[in-house]
Amino acid sequence: MDAKKRPVKIMTVCGAGVGSSVMLRANILDLLKKYGIKGDVITADPVTCKGQKVDIIITQEIFAATIKRTTDAKIILLKNLVSMKELEGKLIPVLREMGYLD
């Protein structure tokens, strides 16, 4: 299915899955709306993210090695999970590459 025809599935991962990943989720939803992209965004911790079928995982370097072994999803690493500027600078090019933006 063409990427533009279905919502992008994004997962945010932080240490407990209830703090910074929830704030990151809100920022992602704002960006998806700004760019007119339909998407689902879920939050998780490094253990519960295993086996989730998503297109993109957004997290920090500390969790990357564990996550990379358990997924085929595109992984975006952020230094600051709540920085909208960093998020937009890294997520939008990936969404464009995946066909969600022209």
Image (cartoon, grey):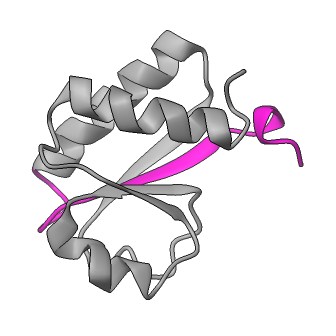
The residue positioned 59% from the left and 56% from the top of the image is 55
The residue positioned 31% from the left and 39% from the top of the image is 25
Query: Horizontal and vertical percent for residue 63?
Result: 22, 73
Query: Horizontal and vertical percent for residue 66?
Result: 30, 85
Q: Find out whether residue 50 is within the magenta segment.
A: no
Q: Is residue 82 left or right of residue 13?
A: left
Q: Is residue 4 left or right of residue 89?
A: right
Chain part drawn in magenta: 1-19
The residue positioned 12% from the left and 68% from the top of the image is 15
Q: Find out whether residue 12 is within the magenta segment.
A: yes
Determine the image quadrant of residue 7: top right
The residue positioned 29% from the left and 82% from the top of the image is 65
Q: Is residue 52 above or below residue 94?
A: below
Q: Is residue 65 left or right of residue 7?
A: left
Name of the residue lying farthest toward the right: 1
Determine the image quadrant of residue 61: bottom left
Q: Is residue 44 above or below residue 58?
A: below
Query: Horizontal and vertical percent for residue 4?
Result: 78, 32
Query: Horizontal and vertical percent for residue 47?
Result: 28, 82
Q: Is residue 75 left or right of residue 9?
A: left
Determine the image quadrant of residue 45: bottom left
